[in-house]
Image: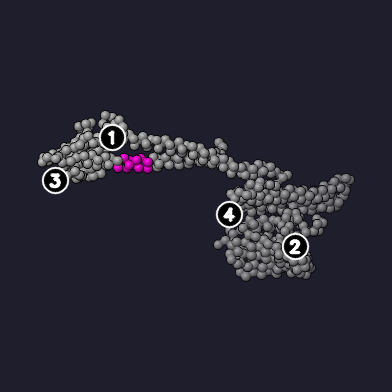
Amino acid sequence: MAKTSIQRRLMIAIVISQLLLAVGLIDVAVFVTRAQLRKAFDVALHGRAMSIAALVRYPEDDSHNLVFERDLVPPPLEPGVPDLYEVFANGHTPVARSPNWPEKYGVLPPKGERWIATYVVNGIAYRARRLEHIPILDREGDAPAKDFLTVTYASPADPVMRAVNEVFLYIAVGSIVLLAISGGFAIWALRRSLRPLAALATNASAVSTSNWELNPPEEALETLELVPLTQAMASMLNGLRRSFNQQRDFLANAAHELKTPVAILKSTLQSLLQRPRSSEEYRVGLEEALDDMARLEKLLHSMLRLARAEQWAAGNLRRDLAPVDLGTTCEAAIVRVHVVARQRGVKIDFVTNGPVRLCADPDDLELVWSNLLENAIRFSPEGGTVRMSIHSTNGCGSVEVADRGPGIPASELPRIFERFHRGDSSRARQTGGYGLGLAISKALVEAYGGTIEPQSSPGEGTRMVVSLPIQQ
């Protein structure tokens, strides 16, 4: 797959936008300049036409033939190229015409005083303007006032085109120079702006399993757009570091926990093979080996259950689940731990205020309640009571398991859900399980979108509160 560059794309976008801006400015400037120059040229034509009309007068004698003073015709607007003019009286009587006026262009039909046209004479483009109903300015005696003139005056349009081309050239050159300056500055600013991102990427590439520190550069921390990215990367690395440490600790703890039953099992079998024994001795030795094997099997089962629960919590929970009643799963868990409770003389008090149903696997919920009840029974005083209650509020079903045991120190509360963590540091078999029960419970609860919260005070007991969303 071909690689793309954000920097290259931005540079191309900047150059294209600058080019479009320059072309647009040139077009607008040329259009406005052409319009203004044509307007000024038309004004000049109007003045020339009026000056031609002023040269028409009545004769001094009694005849009514109009006289045109040709000697007073002003010089052409474009030196070396004669202008064109044509004068008619009352719209049809010719009065005067320039020597180079083309025969094919006669008096056109009236178009109003502001009629403008373009002639091409001898390969030269002329811009013409015609004025109508102009009164004769030089009247003497009893000359009739009803006579009027129609004057058409044309001058070469090349000066306007040359002026437009010069303006276009100046604007184009200026735009190219400004484009080069602004484009170079924009590219320099872009590269400088992307420098913190490159520095952040360089520091991120130095992160490894032995170095989890991102150490973002000061430029990245001072760049508003990079602050969320930097914080997200730091948060992600902290999560990865915790997960990596958890996996490493899990492997170490699992190896430690598996080592003891395997060593005991191996020692038992070796002792049976050291010398010939009676059938009764073999039977006792094999029973001990089976006990150790059962303990090993229980540990492996718990580890597999924890791995599955954590996969579900990561979003792989199956969706083909039927609604179950929380009360039913709690009652099944109470039955499961009844023998342990009776051995310790602990009474389980179960209270519910009605059915609470949600979509879940009943075996998963039963395992959660069993783990919580076993912990509560283990730390309850002999003859004590463990209280289990269910209630629903705000679309959530809550299950509480409370005991009156010694409680959990505040320093231990954040760690009780860690895998293989025991409050008793002796790690002896008599302390109970392997330290996986609460970890499994937390993973299963989170897999169903719920939360589990411990509340404890030393000497006053512990209360575990599990909240699960109720799915209608």
Q: Residue at x 77, y 66 (%)?
A: 458
Quadrant (top left, top right, bottom left, bottom right) of the N terminus: top right
Q: Earlier in the sequence, mark 3 or mark 1?
A: 1
Q: Earlier in the sequence, mark 4 or mark 1?
A: 1
Identify the residue under disc 2.
410
Which dot marks residue 76? Answer: 1
**Mark 2 Cα within 10 Å, few/some/many (few <14, many 20+)?**
few
Q: Which residues are magenta?
A: 32-43
Q: Earlier in the sequence, mark 1 or mark 2?
A: 1
Identify the residue under disc 3.
141
Identify the residue under disc 4.
319
User: Taking the image as drawn, is residue 384 in sight?
Assistant: yes
**Mark 4 Cα within 10 Å, few/some/many (few <14, many 20+)?**
few
**Dot 2: what SS?**
loop
- Report the front residue among 438 and 206: 206
- Report the front residue among 236 and 181: 181
**Dot 1: what SS?**
loop
User: Taking the image as drawn, is residue 316 in sight?
Assistant: no
Give left or right: position of 230 versus 168.
right
Which dot marks residue 176? Answer: none
Disc 1/disc 2 C-alpha distance (Å): 106 Å
* Residue type, mark 1 in image: Pro
Q: Earlier in the sequence, mark 4 or mark 2?
A: 4
* Residue type, mark 4 in image: Arg
**Mark 3 Cα within 10 Å, few/some/many (few <14, many 20+)?**
few
Disc 4/disc 1 C-alpha distance (Å): 94 Å
Q: Earlier in the sequence, mark 3 or mark 2?
A: 3
Image marks 3 and 1: residues in contact by CB distance under 8 Å? no
- Report the front residue among 319 and 157: 157
The kind of secondary structure the magenta stretch mainly shows is helix
